[in-house]
Image (tube, rainbow, N blue to C red):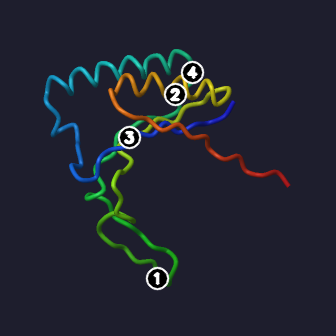
Amino acid sequence: MTLYLLSVPHDSESEPTMATMDPAELEATLAAVGAFNESLEAADALRFAGGLHPPSTATTIDGSGEPATVSPGPFVEAREYLGGLWVIEAADDAAAIAWGTLAAEALGGRVEVRAFQDVPQG
């Protein structure tokens, strides 16, 4: 079994959050995502899930020098950012993509599916 990241991109320009969503839309989305999460749990595929605050709330720590520097804000500015995620376990890419499709349908948006790397043996 392989671990996969199902990531949810958000638009950097608007930095949407649950607090800024229409209450009826939020309720429907939370219900759909809750049902999706229950399906993952029933299949013993869910390892972790969560939503993130927007990049404007981030702190970046750079340890490339001595001492490490701490700066307010995101590491990089981008058109989109990671708004939420699931870490799941799936037998193969096809199974992970099937879960990603269900996640995208629950959200009514886009989801990226990507496998975690295995540490090389050697």
Which residue is outermost to the right? 122
Q: Residue at 42%, 22% (x, y): give it.
A: 37
Q: Check contact, mark 1 vs mark 4: CB within 8 A.
A: no
**How far is the residue under mark 1 from the one under mark 4?**
43 Å
Which residue is outermost to the front? 79
The spot of residue 122 in percent (x, y) is 85, 55
Q: Check contact, mark 1 vs mark 3: CB within 8 A.
A: no
Q: Which mark is residue 87?
A: none
When asked about the image quadrant of residue 85, the answer is top left
**How far is the residue under mark 2 from the one under mark 1?**
38 Å
Q: Residue at 51%, 24% (x, y): give it.
A: 99
The residue pinned by badge 1 equals 67
The amino acid type of the residue labelled 2 equals: Leu
The spot of residue 43 in percent (x, y) is 56, 17
Q: Check contact, mark 2 vs mark 4: CB within 8 A.
A: yes
> Disc 4 on helix, strand or loop?
loop
Q: Is residue 97 above or below residue 59?
A: above
Which residue is outermost to the bottom? 66
The residue pinned by badge 4 equals 44
> Of circles 3 and 4, which is in front?
3
Side (left or right) of 96 relative to 52: right
Q: Earlier in the sequence, mark 3 or mark 4?
A: 4
The amino acid type of the residue labelled 3 equals: Gly
The residue pinned by badge 3 equals 84
The amino acid type of the residue labelled 1 equals: Pro
Side (left or right) of 1 relative to 51: right
The amino acid type of the residue labelled 4 equals: Asp
Q: Earlier in the sequence, mark 1 or mark 3?
A: 1
The residue pinned by badge 2 equals 46
